Amino acid sequence: MLSILYQDSDVLAVDKPPGRVVIPDRARAGKSLREIVDDYLTAFGERGYVVHRLDRGTSGVVLFARSAAAHRALNLSFDRGEAEKGYLALVEGDMSGEGTVDTALYPARRGRMRPAKKDERGQPSLTRWKVLERFERLTWVELRPATGRSHQLRVHLKYIGHPLAFDPTYGRKTPLTACDLVPAVSSAGRRIVLQRTPLHACWIRIPHPSGTGMLFVESPLPDDLKEALRLLRAAAPETEG
């Protein structure tokens, strides 16, 4: 099922669920988001043009262009750094305040990325972060990437010692249960609450391809992240960043 956040004659913004890839991959684990978008647009005699991607485990806003001209305009906005994006993430450890990670990234094996070494020509990458809520062992943060490198947010978070609370590639490899989130509450149980990377693309702002102004699209927080936050907040009073 396709969850549409916004659409007009140039743009289709959809809400990507966790676990679905944006474009077809070798694993072929179900339809890709692009294929689902194409199925929807077929009724209009159109197809979707992928503007940007999210990792399989990430949820949130994904933009598709509905024409080649709109695709070129949106890609140009990304290339010029005119697109702004906001993410929400649940990370390990106790963070406070806000800061910036300005660390170039370099391709590693098996599709991974890592911080570039001094003698390597890495891809310039910058992420701004701000703490929203602090819990006993986890922190809820807002992330604002100024660049859009593959796995950028996940690698930058690991680099500063606060990887995503669950990330089989760059951090913890086992899903988070209710007891993992609130270990002091024995009644929480072993039911799985988060079995994907707790990273959500909550909004995007970009010049509209028609040149008529800015396009702003938001995505609501998914149920699994809502439940994780509910458990964390119920276990202890929230502390401001």
Image: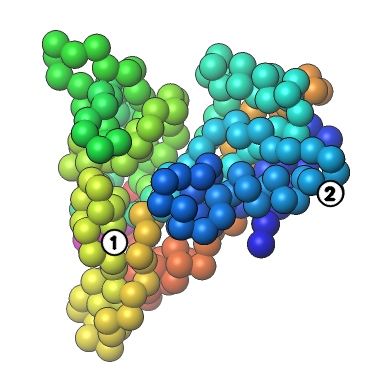
Q: CA distance from mark 1 to mark 2?
A: 48 Å
Q: Amino acid at mark 2?
A: Ala
106 vs 127, nearest the viewer:
106
| Disc 2 element | helix
Query: Would residue 25 be seen by someone viewing this image from the given angle?
Result: yes
Quarter in which the N terminus is drawn: bottom right
**Image vertical order of residue 241 relative to residue 174, above or below:** above
Would residue 51 appear left or right of 54 to someone viewing this image?
Answer: right
Colour treatment of the image: rainbow
Q: Quadrant of residue 139?
A: bottom left
> What residue does disc 1 label?
135
Rendering coords of residue 171 (x, y %): 21, 50
Would residue 103 appear left or right of 82 to someone viewing this image?
Answer: left
> What residue does disc 2 label?
43
- At 64% from the left edge and 28% from the top edge, which residue is drawn? 206
Q: Which SS type dominates the magenta stretch?
A: loop
- At 32% from the left edge and 29% from the top edge, which residue is drawn? 100
172 vs 111, nearest the viewer:
111
Q: Amino acid at mark 1?
A: Phe
| The residue stretch that appears in magenta | 134-138
Rendering coords of residue 180 (x, y %): 24, 71
208 vs 95, nearest the viewer:
208
Mark toward the viewer: 1 or 2: 2
1 or 2: tag closer to the N-terminus: 2
Would residue 162 appear left or right of 225 to someone viewing this image?
Answer: left
Residue density around tag 2, few if under 14, some if 14–19, many if 20 or more, within 10 Å: few
Rendering coords of residue 80 (x, y %): 55, 14
- At 55% from the left edge and 29% from the top edge, which residue is drawn? 84
